[in-house]
Amino acid sequence: MRGYEHANGIAMDLWEAVYHDVLLIALTDTFSTKAFWQDFTADPARARRWRGLRQDSGDPFVFAGEAKEVYERMGIDYREKMIIYSDALNEDKRLRSRSSATPSASTVRPRSPLPAPSTPRGPSFGIGTFLTNDFRSLSSGGKEKSKALNMVIKLASIDDKPCIKISDDLLKNTGDIATVYRVKDIFGLPK
């Protein structure tokens, strides 16, 4: 393992070495979006190659505005990129994200990943707890929707070294708390 400093950039480079020019959607909140932007803006050529970003914690409307600003600072046309929203989506949140996903709303205009990254299709949404739970309970005779299972699978350790995740939701950290605090210090994040 290579440490936490520049971990986002290292991860993107390793990912790209395996998947080349496909599946290049960056998850921004492994160590917080603040830490991600530092590595992302350090390599504008890589940012140009990557098709978009996946927003998985925090406020999607704030995130979209930040993404637009970041792309513009690097001289990248944000309209060529996509955002995939995937944080605890339900139908209401999806509809609000969709209706405000326009440049006039100070957001990146998200693109659908298919058929081509430059094809305007509107916002894209990742599967999740609420959007994939469309089952009806047998005990209600099929009249009531089943309770959504909030299942998240996260890495706990690699070679006996603890893995962590620092979400943009300040209280949603995962992993060894001492390591979380140490990494928050590295990135200048509040504890």
Image: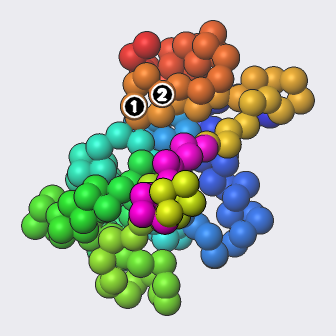
The reply, left or right, for residue 178 in relation to residue 71 is right
Q: Is residue 119 magenta?
A: no
Q: Residue at x 68, y 63 (%)?
A: 16
Q: Are marks 1 and 2 in contact (CB under 8 Å)?
A: yes
User: What quarter of the picture does the N terminus occupy?
Assistant: top right
Coloration mode: rainbow
Identity, as a three-letter code, of the amino acid under mark 1: Asp
The residue at the far left in this view is 104
The residue that label 1 is drawn on is: 169
Residue drawn at the location 49% of the way across and 85% of the way down: 114
Q: 188 above or below 94?
A: above
**Quarter of the rendering containing residue 118:** bottom left
Predominant SS along the magenta part: loop
In this view, the residue in front, 40 or 28, is: 28
Residue 121 placement (x, y as % from top left): 33, 83
Let me know if residue 121 appears in the view: yes
Q: Position of residue 169 (x, y in %)?
A: 39, 31
Q: Residue at x 49, y 89 (%)?
A: 115
Q: Position of residue 179 (x, y in %)?
A: 64, 16
Helix, strand or loop status at disc 2: loop
Give the image location of residue 135, x and y in percent.
52, 64
Q: Secondary structure at mark 1?
A: loop
Q: Which residue is mark 2?
A: 172
Residue type, label 2: Lys
Highlighted range, magenta? 142-151
User: Neighbour class for label 1 at 10 Å: few (<14), some, many (≥20)?
Assistant: few
For the C terminus, give its image quadrant.
Answer: top left
Q: Nearer the viewer, residue 140 or 26?
A: 140
